[in-house]
Each structure stands twice: as C-alpha cells, then as structure tokens.
Image (cartoon, coloured by chain):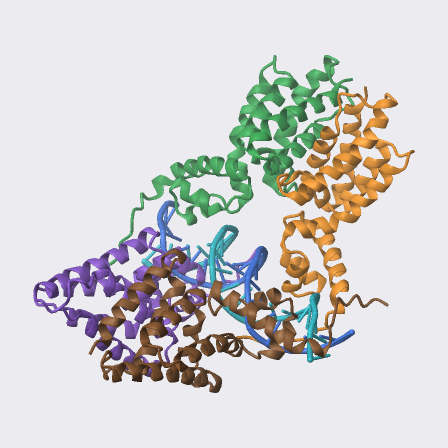
Chain colours: A brown, B purple, C orange, D green, E cyan, F blue
Amino acid sequence: MSTPAKANRGPSAGPENRRALIAAAREIFGEGGVDAPLSAVAKRAGVGQGSLYRHFPDRASLALAVFGDAIVELEDLAASPEADLAGLLELIARQMLVSVGLIQLTLTDTADAQGASVRGRMLAVLGVVLEREWAGGRVDREISADDLLLLLSMLAGVLPRTPLGEREAVVRRALELFWRSFAS
Amino acid sequence: MSTPAKANRGPSAGPENRRALIAAAREIFGEGGVDAPLSAVAKRAGVGQGSLYRHFPDRASLALAVFGDAIVELEDLAASPEADLAGLLELIARQMLVSVGLIQLTLTDTADAQGASVRGRMLAVLGVVLEREWAGGRVDREISADDLLLLLSMLAGVLPRTPLGEREAVVRRALELFWRSFAS
Amino acid sequence: MSTPAKANRGPSAGPENRRALIAAAREIFGEGGVDAPLSAVAKRAGVGQGSLYRHFPDRASLALAVFGDAIVELEDLAASPEADLAGLLELIARQMLVSVGLIQLTLTDTADAQGASVRGRMLAVLGVVLEREWAGGRVDREISADDLLLLLSMLAGVLPRTPLGEREAVVRRALELFWRSFAS
Amino acid sequence: MSTPAKANRGPSAGPENRRALIAAAREIFGEGGVDAPLSAVAKRAGVGQGSLYRHFPDRASLALAVFGDAIVELEDLAASPEADLAGLLELIARQMLVSVGLIQLTLTDTADAQGASVRGRMLAVLGVVLEREWAGGRVDREISADDLLLLLSMLAGVLPRTPLGEREAVVRRALELFWRSFAS
DNA sequence: TATGAATGAGCCTTCATTCAT
DNA sequence: CATGAATGAAGGCTCATTCAT
C-alpha cells in the first residue's frame, strides 16, 4: 500500500548489473583514481549500493574486475608473434592515460589472492614480450619483467598527482627514460 | 558553550609542540603519504587540533616544515664540491625510506607558492650535482634535472603503496635502473 | 575503517525520517533561527547526520521543506476571497511564533534559486491580499508588498533574540505599529 | 635564556589596550555583526586574547563598551534642545549602517545588568526626544519609547542579513514606514 | 536478489576560553 | 598585568558499509 519501491528487475539483472558496474567503475576510476567514492560508481551504473557490494565485496575486487579487460587486451597483444616491447608499452601507456588505476592496482595488495593473480598475468604478459627482446638483443637480460612492472608502477603512481594536461608528456618522457635503461 | 579543559602546559609548550608536530607529521606522512589525516598528526604529537592549525594553517605548511630539514640536508650535500649524483641519490633514497612525502611534495601543486619553492630548491640541488656529472661525462647531457625529479617522483609515488618490508629493495632496484638511463 | 553500526530500521524508515527531520527542524529553527546547527536537527529527529544530508543536501532545502507547509497555508488563505490583510498577518504572526525561520528565509540569499522562489511566493501572497486592501481603500497604495515583506523580515529578525516569554507581546505590538503605517 | 617573549609594556598599557580593543571591536562588529570572532578583535587591536578577557569578561561587555560611545553621541544630540526625532533617527540610522551591532545589542540580554543599562540609556534618549514630539503633536502619544526601540531593533535585526549594497535603501524605506506609524 | 535509505564514524576547520610565563 | 599559545568542543560534510523490504 505504501511501498513506493522504484524498480527491481529481479535476479535476471545480475550479470547486466555486473557489467554496468564495471563500466561505471572504469570511468570513475579513470577520472578520480582508484580512491574515488564507491557510491559514485553505483550511481553512475544506475545500480543500488547493495548490489555493488554483492558483486564486489571490496574496492579491490571491483578494481580487479575493471582491469581484467585491460589485461585481456594486453594478453591479446602479447599473443601476437610480432608484438614487441615498444608496442606493449605503448598500449599500456594509452591505457594508463585513460585509467591510471590499472597499474596503481598491480602493486597494491600483493598478499591478496586476486591481486596476486593480476600481478601474475601482468608479469606473464611482460615476460613473454621481454623474452623476445632479450632474444633479439634489444633489451639487456639484466632487465626483468619485475623491473618493467616496477617502472610502470612508479609511472602510474605519479600520474594521479600530475595535472591532466601534463600527463601525456610525462608518460612520453618516462618511457624514453625507461628505454635508455633497457638497452643492452 | 564549552570549557571542560583538561590541561594547559602554557605557552612554554609552544616550541616543544611545534617540534612534536613536525616529528609526528614526519612519521605519519612517512607511513601514509602527504594525504594522511592531519588529525592523526595532532593525536600522535599529543597536541590539540587547534594548536596544529595555529602552527601550520594548512597541510602544505606542515609538509614544508617537515621537509625543510631534509632539503637543507640535500642543499648542504650539493654545496660540497666532492658531492656526486650517486651520493645525492643515495641521500634522497635514505630520506625517502624515512618519509616518502618529501618527493611527493615536490610534484604536487606547482602553482602554490610554497610548493613551487620546494620544487625549485630540489631542482637547484639536482642541477648543481648534475652539472658536475655532465662535465665528467658520467651522465648524458640528454638527462635533465627535470628528468631526475620525474624519476624520483615516480619512485616516491610508488613507495606508500609498497609494503614496508619491500621498500628498501624497491628503492635500490629503482636507482639501479635509473643509473642505466643516465649513462652517456 | 569503521562499522560498529547500532541499528538500521531499513529504508521503510525513510519517509518517517523525512517527516521527523522536518518536524525537528521546525522546532530547532523556531527556537534558534535558520542558522541553528543542523546536527541538532538530526539529533532531535533521532536520525543519523548522513540521512539528514541525503534528504536535504543543504540548509536551504531543509528550510524550504520546513516552510513549505507554512507557505501553502498562506497561499490557501490568500486564495479565499474573504481573506484580508489582517487575517493574513495574523496567520503569519502565528506561524512566526512557532517558527521564526519562515520570514528569515524570505530575505536571505535572493540569488539562490529556491530561496528566490520562496520569496516570490510570499510576495505573491502578500500582493494578492494587499490589492484587495488597496481597492477597499483600507491600505495606502504607497504601501507595497515589498514593504510588507520588509516589515515582516524585520520582525522575524528580532524574534530569535527575544526571550520566549516576550515574543507574543512583541509580535502583537509590532503588528499594531505596522497597521498605523498602512492606513491611507 | 630561551624565553623569546615578544613585548610586555606592563600595566601601564592597560587603558591604552582597553581603548584599542574597543576601537577594534567597533570595526570588527561593524563588519561582521556582533557574532564576529572575538579573536579577530584581539588580533586587530594588537592585544593578547587574555587581555581582552581581562578587560571584557564576555562578548556582551565588550559590545557594551563599544556602543557606549555611540550612545554618548545620541545622548549629546538628545541634550540639545533643537533635537527632534527625525534627527535622532537619522543619527541612529547612520550609526547602524556603520555598525549594525549597536541596536542588535540593545535587545539582547535584557536580564544582564549592563545590558539593561544600555537599554535604559537608549530609552532615555528616545524618551526625551519623543516627549518633544508628543508636545508638538507631531507624534502620537500612543507611540512609546519602547515602540521606537522595538522598531529600531527590528531594523537592526534585518540589516546583517541584507546585502551591503542594499542596506542604505532598506534603512531609508524602513524609516519612512516607521514615520507613517508615528503620525498622530 | 536488487534496491536504496540509514547509519555513524571520521576528517576538517573554527572559536571561545584558560593559563603558564 | 599582558601575552599569546594551548586546549578541545562544536559543527559541517563525506563516505564506507549494512540491512529492511
């Protein structure tokens, strides 16, 4: 009689909501960093806060889901035989400029099982391509995938504090400096 | 509308409080970065919130005070004729391990007058020593003081997210990678 | 970083809370004027601060809700053909004695959209009735609705500073004085 | 040895400080109303907070002192045989535009002894001049000094909420309306 | 299961007031 | 008696998280 519930599309909306949440989170995290309010994510997704918590019990698992896609992109690229480190870093840089959180995430919560998996996948991607560069003598074997991840993490850590207008330049220059390191 | 004060050690506590606040802030900023709650600083210093605001009207002025000493140390080192980049970075690294905020600060809010001055002093210090390395042919002239600051900022950005136990190793490895970049 | 919740009556408490907030605000604003602490409103309503802010994002929207009823009352009265200025002022006086904030609100922040609308509605109400008095020659055409609002605002401004016991007398005498002004 | 006290001109500074405080308070109250922060008064007076509290144990006594001068002005005017109500109100209006607090004060804290005295002096001033108007038949004997004080208080109550640019007009119009009340 | 309101802790900031020197 | 720092209690606002429906 007095239950002005708005709408409840029922359980069937589950997967749809999940996708909406991830999409919203990608945007929100991209704009405000991984520390952006979760409520904003739910709101942009047009989903109740409760649903957000049901799908993603904590911030990390949401972030993880968000960056899953990005990693898939990277994995796809790495799978291609012609992929080189330059191309990979290029793609990562582009992703970073869109959503800084990607790499921010990879260093955080290593202890956490899911976090470890993301980290593992990133390392795998980097490792595959790196191997090729080693083989071609273009990158020193002294340089490990861990090193690459460290450098990328550092870059990601600095971007949220960088004025939007300068981010592109910072990313470019950082990659140049990194490359100087890589040469064998 | 309130007066149940508990204790008031009097103005003589002023300088002591100031020092306690700076010390507390060094710890808190060191643990959590420059964004850590100011209330935590007051609490750890055993000082009223009001006193914190009297001594340091905003976060920046507190950060400045905290890192003032550090910068003086760097300036002292740079002033010595035998100082080389390795030594300087070594000192910065040590400072970073204690308090990540120093470099975090140098990248933030260049517009702000005080922040700009910190940034300026850092660049000056780096520039002085860098010049010598250029002259000695040990560092490529392609590498600028800005580049050094960028790399250090990236490193600083990543440390607060790194587990305490791994920070030392991360700093070490990062510096090694940086050096590979510098060689001419 | 905190979760020791105490109780959560669920969303069903929503409308009830809203009503409790408005009722509490009517009291608090009535006692202390529109500048009274919002936290006091939440407390008296027995509602979390967060809920208050959810229902009423800012002080103005709360005030608006509080005085919405009152204005409707006035509009209803003005709509009746027999309504005269005496009756209207009588009603306003009675409302004022309950909650001073109504008129306080009408003078504040005309720039603000919602505030302007309240002001507009008050002026409309006053204008309608005033017109009739003009026509009947009972009030000088020199006297405008703006004048009425000014006088009422002045009265409202003084009430929060008047001891409760004297408010009634002050209102009565003020209206008498006003009427002397109105005569043509 | 380590007592960097700044300056303490000793007891002789007493009366001087008192005067400085009153002057500062006149400015501060004039700008921000009687609710302005007391610390601002002490600061502008160039006097310690403690001294402020020594001279004026509470806000009211400071306000009282501040408006003592103003009242003297009014008393002087009233003492002159040619003074009429128009002139007196004119002067009060001018004082109000400079410092709203004057009349704000007269209604507050009637219970308080000092407040009562200010109120008494205001009533006396108004009474003296009013008497003359009564005698000349220019003001209805129905209008009392209390009425005048009430109207002025109302006006004072509304001014702090009025945008600076409109205050003059509001005062003018209010006085016009008041005069309509006074006529016998 | 989805919804979205409720909750309350926490941080920031401002001030009135006290008190050692 | 002056000084000015110290204190801590408001009050404002935001957000993570829970939970009745």
Q: Is residue A103 left or right of residue D8?
A: right
Q: Is residue D39 above or below residue D83?
A: below
Residue B162, image quadrant: bottom left
Q: Going by the picture, which residue comes out furthest to the right?
A: C82
Q: Is residue B65 left or right of residue C149?
A: left
**Can residue A141 be seen by looking at this rendering?**
yes
Please count the marks in the image.
0
Does residue C79 appear to the left or right of B33 in the view shown?
Answer: right
Q: Residue C28, relative to residue A10: is it above or below?
A: above
The location of residue A149, given as percent across then percent down, is: 34, 78
> Image quadrant of residue B184?
bottom left
Image quarter (top left, top right, bottom left or bottom right) of the C terminus of chain A: bottom left
Residue at 69% across, 16% down: D132
Give the percent coordinates (x, y) of residue C106: 69, 40
How far from the left and from the top, in percent, is residue C175? 78, 32
The N terminus of chain A lies in which quarter of the figure?
A: bottom right
Q: Which residue shows up at 36% across the image and 69% down it?
A: A90
* Whether residue C161 can be seen here: no
Image quadrant of residue D43?
A: top left
- Residue at position x 56%, y 69% in the image: A23
Residue in front for this viewpoint, A19 or C177: A19
Residue B81: where, in percent of width, then height? 8, 64
